[in-house]
Image (spheres, helix red, strand yellow):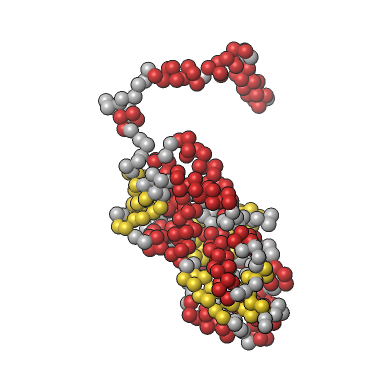
Amino acid sequence: MKKKIVLAYSGGLDTSVLVRILGEDYGYDVIACHIDVGEARDPELIAARAKRAGAHAVEVISAQEEYVTDFCFPALQANALYEGVYPLSAALSRPLIAKHLVKMAKKHGATAVAHGATGKGNDQVRFDLAVKGIAPELAIVAPQREKNITRDAAMEYAAKHGIEVPTTKKSPFSVDENVWGRSIEGGILEDPNAEPPEEAFAWTKSLKDAPNEPIYVTVGFQGGTPVSLDGVAMPPLTLVRKIGALAGEHGVGRIDLMENRVVGIKTRETYECPAAIALITAHKDLERFCTLGMSHRVKTGLDTKYAELIYEGFWFSPLRESLQAFNDVHDKNTTGEVRLRLFKGSCVAVGRTSPFGVYNHNMSTYGVQDKFDHRAAEGFIQLLGMQLAEHSRIHAGGATIHTEAHAAKVSK
C-alpha cells in the first residue's frame, strides 16, 4: 500500500506536473488540496484537472472568509507592513494553506505534505516553518526545490505525459493573488530601473486614468477590526472587497519595493494591495487617536517585529501569538470611524471620531475655551531639564561647544 501525501495544489502548470512526479518518482498516492483564498479561478475546473493529472483524491476548500478574519485582520491590528511598505498579502496566505494541508493529512492518513515552492523564494520557508510549527511529525517534500524544475521542463513533462495544463494568454509576469493583495513578478520587472508597465496591473488604475475628483469613504472599527463602510455594516470579506474596489479605482495600493528576501536575495517586487493599504491607513489613524502615547510608541516597534515574523514564516510561533495577545488588549478601545480621502494614488485620513478618543478639546484649544494650566508647564520643564542643566554646568556647556566645533569643521 502506497504512502499518502497532501499537495498544495494551485491548478497551474507546476503543481499539475507535481501530481504526476510525486506519484511516479516519489511513490505516493497524491491528495491534491486546493485552498481558495481569493484566486480568480474555477474550483470545479481545478478539481477536475487534478484528477486528470493523476491525483488519488482532491480536496477543494473555500477559505476566503477564514483568511480575512483569522489572518488578514490580525495582521491589520499590527499595521503589518514588511519593511514599512508591503502588506504581506502572499506571505499571510501561506500559514493558512499549511494549516489546511495538515488538516487534510490527518483526514486522509498522509505521512507527508508537499508544495511547489522553489529553492530561492520565500514561500518554501513559510510552508516548511508553518508545518513544523503545527505538525512536526509530517515529512515535507518540495520537488521544485530538490529538482529545480524550470518552466520549460515542466511544459515538456506535461506534454510528454499528456497532463492538462491551463491554456491562457502568454504573459511575461508571474502573478499570485488573494483577497488581501496581488503580487507581480518577472519580465521587465526584474530590471530595478524599469518603470512597471500598465499591463502589469489589474486592480488599480493609473494616476492619469483615475478620477479627477476625490472620493471620501468612512471606515468603522470595533476593537481594532473593521466592521462597516459609510455606516453600513458588512461581513469581513465583503468589506475588504468593497473598499479594495473603491481604492483601486482611485489608483491606491500600487507598491514597488526592492525587497530583502528571507534567503538573502534582494529582489524587485511589485504589488497591488488597495484594500490593505486603505484599511491599514485607517486603523493606524484611529489607533493613534484612541491610545496613550506610551503604548503607541511601544506598539510601533512591535508592529515591525510582527510583520517580520509573518514574512519569515513564523506565524505559528509563540512570539507571534504573544504579540497578538498584546494587540488584542491594546486595540480593545480602538473603536470608532475614520474618514479617508482617496485621490490619484493617495489615501489620507482626514477625520476621525471615537467614544474613546484620548483627546480633550478644552485642553488642546488655543481659543477662549482653553482649560490648560499654562503655569504648570514651567515646573514641568524645570524637572524635565534638570539633568541637562546639571550636565551642562559640569561640562561648561560641552554640548554647545562640540556642536559649534563640528559646524566649523564642516564649513572648512
Q: Is residue 268 visible?
A: no
Residue 204 appears in which quarter of the rendering?
Answer: bottom left
Residue displayed at 70% across by 80% down: 27
Residue displayed at 58% across by 68% down: 102
Residue displayed at 45% across by 55% down: 73
Name the foreground residue: 104 vs 354: 104
Name the foreground residue: 396 vs 161: 161
Pick the quarter of the image with the C terminus. Answer: top right
Task: Pinpoint residue 143: horizontal percent, then vertical percent.
Answer: 69, 72
376 vs 67, left or right, is left
- Number of numbered discs overlaid on the protein picture: 0
Task: Pinpoint residue 373: horizontal percent, then vertical percent.
Answer: 35, 21
Q: Is residue 11 visible?
A: yes
Q: Residue furthest left?
A: 368
Q: In the figure, 331 relative to 21: above or below?
A: above
Pick the quarter of the image with the N terminus. Answer: bottom right
362 vs 197, left or right, is left
Task: Pinpoint residue 68: horizontal percent, then vertical percent.
Answer: 45, 61
130 vs 252, left or right, is right
Q: In the figure, 103 relative to 79: above or below?
A: below
Name the foreground residue: 280 vs 67: 67
Name the foreground residue: 223 vs 248: 223
Residue displayed at 29% across by 54% down: 231
Task: Pinpoint residue 19: horizontal percent, then vertical percent.
Answer: 63, 79
